[in-house]
Amino acid sequence: MKNLSFVVAGLLFPFFALAQNPVARFFDNPAVNELNCSFEYTVRGSVPLTGDGTVWMSGECFKVAGNGIIVLCDGVTRWMVDEETMEIYAESADDVRELLNDPGALLKSLRSPVYGKDSLKGTFDYDGRTTDITFTDIRVTAVGDNKKPFTPEDEVKGLVKEGYILTDLR
């Protein structure tokens, strides 16, 4: 009987771990939750490529920043900001729903995910190459009524005022 208890506990552990996982909590109701985290990745190959950055998501909106590039999306438009050249490219979000342009799709598609209390590790394939990625410091919070919502378009307008050049490809 004691062994059966260990077997049952072992079978149920992944379900309890997933229930406590902040990523799963975010996707339970992304319209009223915000997810913030940091990430590091390594693209495997003869010369590995590495990078890091931050992610913010809420509803259909997201912001991914890393390696001098910021990607902003409001669910309708996606803006790619190159901080070095001070250029911004606007595209329809419908045209760019792929793993590297949508952190929600990437989080859902990880192979062999390993969840920690506030972290997630996994791999994904893109363009024939395998990438190892680790998300850390994952925080999921409810969007408060008295909190001004983040709008990517407002951030883009602010960057244009700072001298960034906007090219609209929509």
Image (cartoon, rainbow, N blue to C red):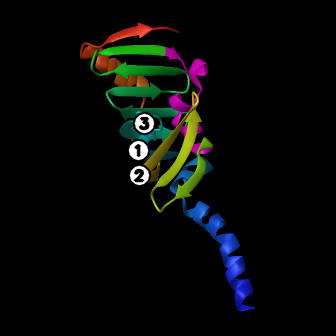
Determine whether, in the image, residue 117 is placed left or right of residue 3: left
Residue sitting at 44 percent across and 20 percent down? 79
- Residue type pointed to by label 1: Phe
Disc 1 versus disc 2: distance between alpha carbons? 6 Å
Could you say whether the residue bearing mark 2 is in a helix, strand or loop?
Answer: strand
Image: 62 above or below 139: above
Residue 33 at x, y percent in the picture: 51, 47
Which residue in the structure is indicated by mark 1? 39
18 drawn magenta: no
Q: Earlier in the sequence, mark 3 or mark 1?
A: 1
Q: Residues within 10 Å of mark 3 (few under 14, many from 20)?
A: few
Q: Residues within 10 Å of mark 2 (few under 14, many from 20)?
A: some
- Residue type pointed to by label 3: Pro
Image: 158 above or below 56: above
Q: Earlier in the sequence, mark 1 or mark 2?
A: 1
Residue sitting at 51 percent across and 15 percent down? 91
106 drawn magenta: yes
Disc 3 versus disc 2: distance between alpha carbons? 24 Å
Disc number lying in front (3 or 2): 2
Which residue in the structure is indicated by mark 2? 136
Residue 140 at x, y percent in the picture: 47, 52
Q: Are marks 3 and 1 in contact (CB under 8 Å)?
A: no
Q: Do the residues labelled 1 and 2 touch (CB within 8 Å)?
A: yes
Could you say whether the residue bearing mark 3 is in a helix, strand or loop?
Answer: loop
Residue range corresponding to the magenta coloring:
91-108
Nearer the observer, 56 or 126: 126
Which residue in the structure is indicated by mark 3? 149
Determine whether, in the image, residue 103 is placed left or right of residue 53: right
Q: Earlier in the sequence, mark 3 or mark 2?
A: 2
Nearer the observer, 163 or 12: 12
Q: Is residue 155 visible?
A: yes
